[in-house]
């Protein structure tokens, strides 16, 4: 898994495709990006707690890491070269 893009909001778009959020929520436990771990799923951006990195399936069907009202890339020190690993249930 890798970082494909970091958008202008600081959302980290990965290359992990997931067209079914419910299935992904059951299968993916955590994702590490660099030395940081992300373990919380949200269905929409507004569900996320402030300053907490969360997973979301974006409109393109790819898993993204986002932070409500903040930049996930900045908070997690993520770049396009960051190592990303998925931990499955």
Image (cartoon, helix red, strand yellow):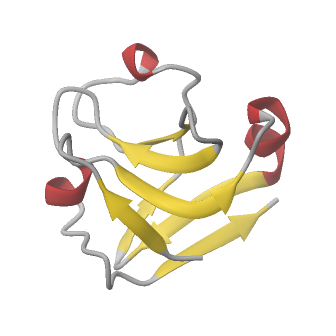
Q: Position of residue 37 (x, y in %)?
A: 44, 63
* Residue 4, placed above or below residue 24: below
Q: Position of residue 65 (x, y in %)?
A: 42, 49
Extreme-front residue of the structure: 60
Q: Is residue 10 left or right of residue 49?
A: left
Among the 4 quarters of the image, the one containing residue 74: bottom left
Q: Is residue 76 left or right of residue 49?
A: left
How many numbered marks are there?
A: 0
Q: Residue at x 34, y 81 (%)?
A: 82
Q: Residue at x 43, y 84 (%)?
A: 83
Q: Is residue 30 left or right of residue 38?
A: right
Q: Position of residue 68 (x, y in %)?
A: 27, 28
Q: Position of residue 26 (x, y in %)?
A: 82, 42
* Residue 5, placed above or below residue 59: below
| Depth order, front residue of 13/73 | 13
* Residue 20, placed above or below residue 16: above
Among the 4 quarters of the image, the one containing residue 35: bottom left
Q: Residue at x 73, y 54 (%)?
A: 28
Quarter of the rendering occupied by the N terminus? bottom right
Quarter of the rendering occupied by the C terminus? bottom right
* Residue 48, placed above or below residue 78: above
Q: Residue at x 77, y 39 (%)?
A: 19
């Amino acid at each position: 898994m890798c970082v494909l893009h970091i958008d202008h909001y600081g959302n980290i778009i990965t290359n992990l495709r997931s067209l079914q959020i419910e299935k992904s929520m059951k299968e993916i436990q955590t994702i590490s990006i660099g030395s940081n771990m992300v373990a919380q799923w949200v269905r929409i951006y507004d569900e996320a707690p402030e300053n907490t990195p969360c997973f979301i399936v974006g409109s393109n069907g790819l898993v993204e890491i986002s932070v409500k009202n903040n930049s996930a890339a900045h908070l997690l020190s993520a770049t396009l070269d960051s190592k990303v690993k998925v931990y499955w249930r």
